[in-house]
């Protein structure tokens, strides 16, 4: 009887460890894969490629990050960064933010993209992403 109680106690401890470990793994997966916007209006998660955004314009910005990622990060190209600086479009210190913001501004208003920057954006992929996320881009009626 005593052995049975000891075994049961060990089993309970093991089950608690398994539950706690599962919870930690689930929390880590959520943190890793979901775009968690801490104090931001939108977020792109480059691991899962999932976007979260609160307004159509912010969605465009986040799609810009996704485009940058799926295109192999042209924002990290020194030529892109130099061109952005020369055009005084370096609104942020972070080239990835500049890339996404310039993209959003251009898609929002086609007159805003300088010819010098056109080739840094994959417009075919952009069309696919805009089509995929078109529901988010339509303001509520
Ligand atoms: Zn951003």
Image: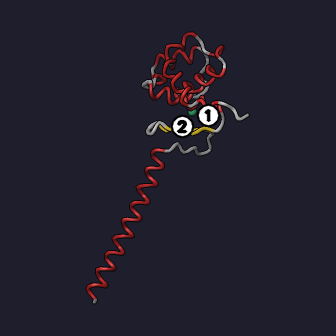
* Number of disc labels: 2
Q: Quadrant of ligand 1?
A: top right
**Which of 90 and 54 lies nearest the eye of the viewer?**
54
- The reply to whether dot 1 and dot 2 touch (C-beta < 8 Å) is yes
Which residue is depicted at the point 58% across and 22% down?
A: 103
Name the quadrant containing residue 104: top right
| Residue lying at the far bottom of the rendered structure | 1
- SS at mark 1 in the image: helix
**Which of 14 and 127 lies nearest the eye of the viewer?**
127
Horizontal and vertical percent for residue 3?
Answer: 26, 85
Which residue is depicted at the point 44% across and 24% down?
A: 71
Q: Earlier in the sequence, mark 1 or mark 2?
A: 2
| Residue lying at the far right of the rendered structure | 141
**Label 1 – label 2 distance at C-alpha:** 10 Å
- The residue at which mark 2 appears reads as 51
Q: State left or right for residue 129 relative to residue 5.
A: right
Horizontal and vertical percent for residue 68?
Answer: 49, 26
Q: Is residue 105 above or below residue 51?
A: above
Colour mapping: secondary structure
Q: Quadrant where the N terminus lies?
A: bottom left
Horizontal and vertical percent for residue 105?
Answer: 63, 22
Horizontal and vertical percent for residue 30?
Answer: 47, 50
Q: State left or right for residue 34 relative to residue 41.
A: left
- The residue at which mark 1 appears reads as 136
Cβ of mark 1 under 8 Å from ligand 1: the answer is: no
**Which of 55 and 40 lies nearest the eye of the viewer?**
55
- SS at mark 2 in the image: strand
């Amino acid at each position: 009887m005593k052995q049975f109680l000891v075994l049961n106690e060990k089993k309970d401890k093991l089950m608690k460890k398994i539950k706690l470990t599962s919870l930690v793994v689930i929390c880590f997966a959520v943190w890793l894969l979901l775009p968690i916007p801490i104090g931001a209006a939108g977020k792109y998660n480059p691991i899962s490629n999932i976007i979260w955004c609160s307004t159509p314009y912010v969605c465009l910005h986040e799609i810009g990050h996704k485009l940058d990622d799926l295109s192999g990060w042209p924002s990290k190209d020194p030529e892109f960064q130099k061109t952005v600086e020369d055009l005084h479009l370096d609104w942020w210190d972070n080239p990835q933010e500049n890339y996404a913001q310039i993209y959003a501004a251009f898609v929002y208003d086609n007159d805003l993209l300088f010819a010098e920057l056109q080739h840094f954006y994959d417009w075919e992929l952009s069309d696919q992403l805009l089509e995929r996320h078109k529901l988010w881009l339509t303001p509520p009626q």
